[in-house]
């Protein structure tokens, strides 16, 4: 199947998706991550198939994964992150690699965690860990000389 990875969403649909995500962002900032997930899922359902051909999918899935991670829904966060890696700009996105590495470490998948956390570190430096539990950066230091 030939998928145009640079395709742009219809303007009206794009605005609708942005509105859902903005609502989700406001809820997430208030610490209401579960309600944020509801809004992000509305945005996700609005994305046309194939969903992984749109840049919007990458940032929607990042938002879903972040809210799931912060809510303790690590399995859902992992699923969203793994799918985000198939979307435009997914691979190489430091934030996606950070969250995926955190999920893997929390699941006990240390080798996968080290790989993803190192990708995050290489892409954004130590600053990407600034607002995260020291647990993750300390783990990475046991696997690499930083």
Image: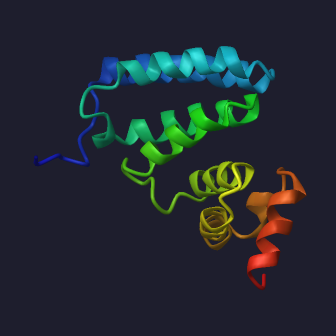
Residue at 67 percent across and 68 percent down: it is 114
Is 60 or 104 nearer to us in this picture? 104
Which of the 4 image quadrants contains residue 28?
top right
The number of callouts visible is: 0
Q: Is residue 55 above or below residue 117?
A: above
Residue at 28% of width from left, 42% of height from top? 53
Left or right of residue 78: residue 69 = right
With 40 as the anchor, is 71 left or right in this view? right
Side of 59 relative to 112 (left or right): left
Image spot of residue 63 (x, y percent) = 59, 34
Q: Horizontal and vertical percent for residue 61?
A: 50, 36
Give the residue drawn at x 45%, y 59%.
91
Residue at x 80%, y 21% (from the top left corner): 30
| Outermost right residue | 134
Position of residue 74 measured from the top left corner of the image (x, y, whole percent): 66, 37
Query: Where 5 sits versus 24, above or below?
Result: below
Quadrant into which the C terminus falls: bottom right
Q: Nearer the viewer, residue 95 or 16?
A: 95
Given residues 79 and 28, the one toward you in this image is: 79
Q: Camera-side residue: 129 or 14?
A: 129
């Amino acid at each position: 199947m030939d998928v145009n990875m640079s395709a742009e969403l219809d303007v009206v649909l794009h605005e609708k998706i942005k509105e859902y995500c903005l609502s989700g962002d406001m809820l997430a900032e208030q610490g209401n991550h579960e309600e944020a997930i509801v809004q992000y899922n509305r945005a996700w359902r609005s994305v046309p198939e194939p969903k992984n051909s749109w840049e919007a999918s990458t940032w929607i899935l990042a938002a879903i994964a972040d809210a799931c991670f912060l809510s303790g829904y690590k399995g859902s966060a992992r699923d969203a992150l793994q799918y985000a890696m198939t979307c435009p700009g997914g691979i190489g996105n430091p934030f996606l690699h950070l969250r995926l590495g955190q999920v893997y470490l929390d699941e006990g998948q240390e080798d996968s965690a080290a790989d993803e956390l190192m990708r995050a570190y290489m892409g954004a430096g130590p600053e990407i860990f600034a607002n995260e539990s020291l647990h993750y950066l300390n783990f990475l230091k046991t696997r690499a000389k930083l």
